[in-house]
Image (cartoon, rainbow, N blue to C red):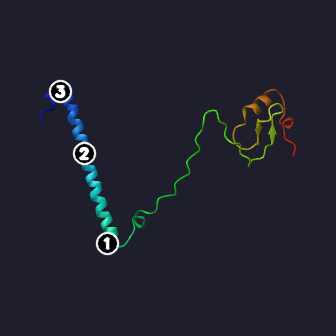
Amino acid sequence: MDLKSMAVGELKKLKAKIEKEIGNRENQHKNKAMGEIKAVVAKYGLKLDDIVGKAPAAKKPAAKKVPGKKAAAKSSKKILYRHPENSQLTWGGGRGRRPQWIKDWEAAGKTLDEVRVSQ
């Protein structure tokens, strides 16, 4: 088979046939191997889980974000600071970055004690 004399269209058709044949042969090899493995497992009265171990428990899928919908506030953290003009702006004072409203508050020369929630 002289590939140099073939047109591009003919080469693409040949490539598709080759890829299809490779896929078929890979499936045949996998199926043959699985048949042999199942036969050995059955011969000794084992389960496939005994050989490969149990699959880890599936993780709970993360909640999908819906545009325009706010996430529910976590109630487990205490609120230590609340913006005096917008009560929805809160901060627990924990780890991580400070919220922008806290940065703005301090940049204006005000102290955190002014927005601390009384307990």
Q: Position of residue 50 (x, y in %)?
A: 42, 67
Of the residues under marks 2 and 3, which one precedes in the sequence?
3
Q: Assess whether mark 1 and mark 3 are in contact (beta carbons under 8 angstroms).
A: no
**Which amino acid, by three-letter code, is at mark 1?**
Lys
Q: Is residue 54 left or right of residue 62?
A: left
Q: Position of residue 21 (x, y in %)?
A: 23, 44
Q: Residues within 10 Å of mark 3 (few under 14, many from 20)?
A: few
Q: Residue at x 77, y 38 (%)?
A: 90
**Which amino acid, by three-letter code, is at mark 2?**
Ile
Q: Residue at x 27, y 46 (%)?
A: 23
Q: Which image quadrant is residue 20 in?
A: top left
Q: Residues within 10 Å of mark 2 (few under 14, many from 20)?
A: few
Q: Residue at x 67, y 37 (%)?
A: 70
Q: Is residue 102 left or right of residue 12?
A: right
* 61 over 6 or under it: above or below: below
Please give the residue where the numbered disc 1 appears in the rendered image.
Answer: 43
Residue 34, numbered label: none
Q: Residues within 10 Å of mark 1 (few under 14, many from 20)?
A: few
Towards the viewer: 116 or 14: 14
Please give the residue where the numbered disc 2 appears in the rendered image.
Answer: 22
Please give the residue where the numbered disc 3 appears in the rendered image.
Answer: 7
